[in-house]
Image (cartoon, grey):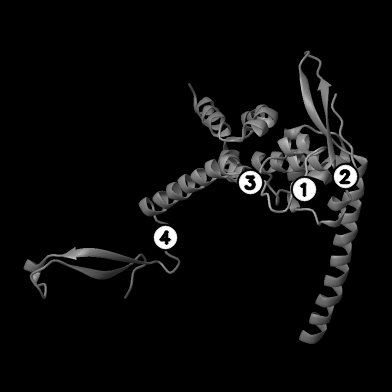
Amino acid sequence: MNIQSCVLYAYRLLLVLYPPSFRRRFAGEMLELAAAAEPSEWPLIFGDTSVAIVRCWLEGTHSTAALAESNAYVPLRESPISAFVFLPGLVLSIVTIAGLSYVNYKWPPPCANGVHVVMRDVDPSQGGPSQRPKLARIATASSSTT
Amino acid sequence: MEVKDKDSENEDDRPLSSAALHILLALAESDLHGYGIMQSVKRQSEGTFKLGPGTLYANLDRLLAGGLVGETERKLKDGESRREYFLTSSGERVLRLEVRRLRQVINVARTRLGKLGERGA
C-alpha cells in the first residue's frame, strides 16, 4: 500500500463524517477529486474538507433542504437545527479543537520575537532561596545576544 | 438527466461569496465537472484563490438548491458517466447583478482612493 492509497483511505474515512444525504450525493466526486490532486494539495484538501464537514453539520445540508422545499414551511419559532443534527457537529468541533490544541501544545510555534518563556524546576540544593522546589521564569533567546 | 432551473428573487438581493462567484464565473465559460471547476477557478484567479473540495461542494450544494447551477449526466466514451454542472439562466442573471455591484464598488473605490492620493500630495 503506497502513500497515496493511505491518504485516499484516510480521506474516505473523513468523508464518512458528512451528513448521509450530502455524502450520498457528493462523496464519490470528492474522492475522485482527491485522487486526482497533487501531493502538495493534500493539506488543503484535508483542512478544507474538515472545516466544511463541521459547517455542513451546523448549517445543515441543502441536499435535503431542496427536496423538502416544495411543501416545507418552517415557522419562526421552530429552529431547523435539531439536537440530532446539532450534537454530532458539536462533538466533531470539540474533537477538532482538542486535537489542534494538543498539536499546538506538543509542537508550539516559534514566538514572533524569538524569545521563549520556559517554566522549570529549580533545585534548592544549588543555592535556591527556599527548601521547596520552585518554578523559575527563564527567558531564552533563540538569537545570540551580546 | 436532472435539470434544475428556478427563479429565486431572494438570491438576487444577496451578494455572492467569493467561492460562489468564482464557481459561477467558471461555469459561465463552459459546463464542467468538479475537478474542472477547481482547475478553472485556479486559472481565472491566477492561483490566488484555491478552492478545496469541501468548499466547492458545499457551495455547489447551495447553488443547486438555489437554482443558480444545474447538473447533468454526461456519457463518456468508455461507457461511464460523469456529472457536470452548468450555469442556469437564473445563475447568469445573479452573476450579472453581482458583477454590476462589484463595478459600482470599484468606481466608488477609485474615486475615494483618488481623493486620498490628492490629499497626500
Q: In the rendered view of the protein, which quadrant contains the C terminus of chain A? A: bottom left
To which residue does mark 1 refer? B20
Q: Is residue A125 visible?
A: yes
User: In the picture provided, is A129 more to the left or to the right than A142?
Assistant: left
Specify the subunit that label 3 lies on.
Answer: A
Specify the subunit that label 1 lies on.
Answer: B
Crowding at mark 1 (Cα within 10 Å: few <14, some 14-19, many 20+): some
Relative to residue B82, is residue A95 depicted above or below? Answer: below
Disc 4 and disc 1 on one polypeptide chain: no
Disc 3 and disc 1 on one polypeptide chain: no
**Distance Cα–Cα, label 3 vs label 4:** 40 Å
Q: Nearer the viewer, mark 4 or mark 2?
A: 2
Q: The disc labelled 4 sits on which kind of residue?
A: Pro
* Residue found at x 18% / y 63%: A121
**Distance Cα–Cα, label 4 vs label 2:** 46 Å
To which residue does mark 3 refer? A81
To which residue does mark 4 refer? A110
Specify the subunit that label 2 lies on.
Answer: B
Q: What SS does tag 4 mark? A: loop
**Distance Cα–Cα, label 3 vs label 1:** 24 Å
